[in-house]
Amino acid sequence: MDNIKTIINNDLNNKLLNEKLIDKLDIIKTDINKVKSEIKLTKNSDIDPDLKKTILTKHSIKLNELKEEQLKLKHQRLMTYDYSNNLPLLIKSLKSIDLEAENDYKELFSYVVAKSREELILCIHLSNRNLSDIDLTKESTNESASHGSFPFKQSRLLLDTVWSIIVI
């Protein structure tokens, strides 16, 4: 029950974070439009040329800062895209793989994380995030797309190895 509660809380927190980013982007877009209109007004005004240049410089600096912040927020929003809608398609394609065919399953998984001898996490990279930027310890706590177990014998020790597939 606690597992379902944490999954729902995580999903809700991700959606709230995305909504906050959208709100911040809207505010920044409004601010950019205000600064652009102030630049236009300043250019059309009849004030001292030196003063006009100073004001335009300040507005340009402010505009560049806002555009930089907007770019950072767009990047952050893009990196937190939710790929959970693609999971049913992924599970369907995984189930339809012909097990008798000569498939190289190593190409399917980006990483294999061994939490212990008895627990493996197979990672499939579907996001547009750079693989080197992904924190696997954080990602390994995500809900698995599929999971199971298989018996494994290692030096006269029979282990029941648990595996799970996560999408990063």
Image (tube, rainbow, N blue to C red):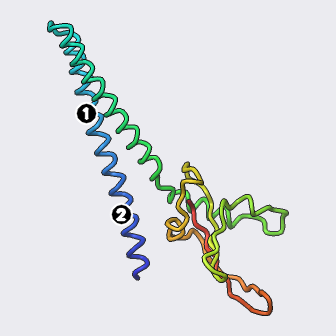
Q: Secondary structure at mark 2?
A: helix
Left or right: 118 as drawn, with respect to 2: right
Q: Position of residue 35 (x, y in %)?
A: 24, 26
Q: Position of residue 44 (x, y in %)?
A: 20, 9
**Cα distance between the residues tagged 2 and 1:** 27 Å
Residue occupied by mark 2: 12
Above or below — where is 121 with respect to 161?
above
Q: Amino acid at mark 1?
A: Thr
Sequence-first tag of 2 and 1: 2
Which is in the foreground here, disc 2 or disc 1? 1
Q: Quadrant of the C terminus?
A: bottom right
The label on residue 88 is none
Q: Are marks 2 and 1 in contact (CB under 8 Å)?
A: no
Q: Residue at x 68, y 64 (%)?
A: 94
Q: Nearer the viewer, residue 133 or 44?
A: 133
Above or below — where is 97 with respect to 59?
below
Q: Secondary structure at mark 1?
A: helix
Residue occupied by mark 1: 30
Q: Quadrant of the N terminus?
A: bottom left
Left or right: 11 as drawn, with respect to 31: right
Q: Position of residue 103 (x, y in %)?
A: 80, 62
Query: Count the marks: how many?
Result: 2
Q: Nearer the viewer, residue 165 or 87?
A: 165
Q: Kindly give the residue lying farthest to the left in the view shown.
A: 47
Q: Residue at x 46, y 46 (%)?
A: 78
Q: Position of residue 108 (x, y in %)?
A: 70, 60
Left or right: 104 as drawn, with respect to 118: right
Left or right: 42 as drawn, with respect to 155: left
Image quadrant where residue 12 sits: bottom left
Q: Amino acid at mark 2?
A: Leu
Q: Nearer the viewer, residue 133 or 147?
A: 133
Q: Residue at x 37, y 35 (%)?
A: 68
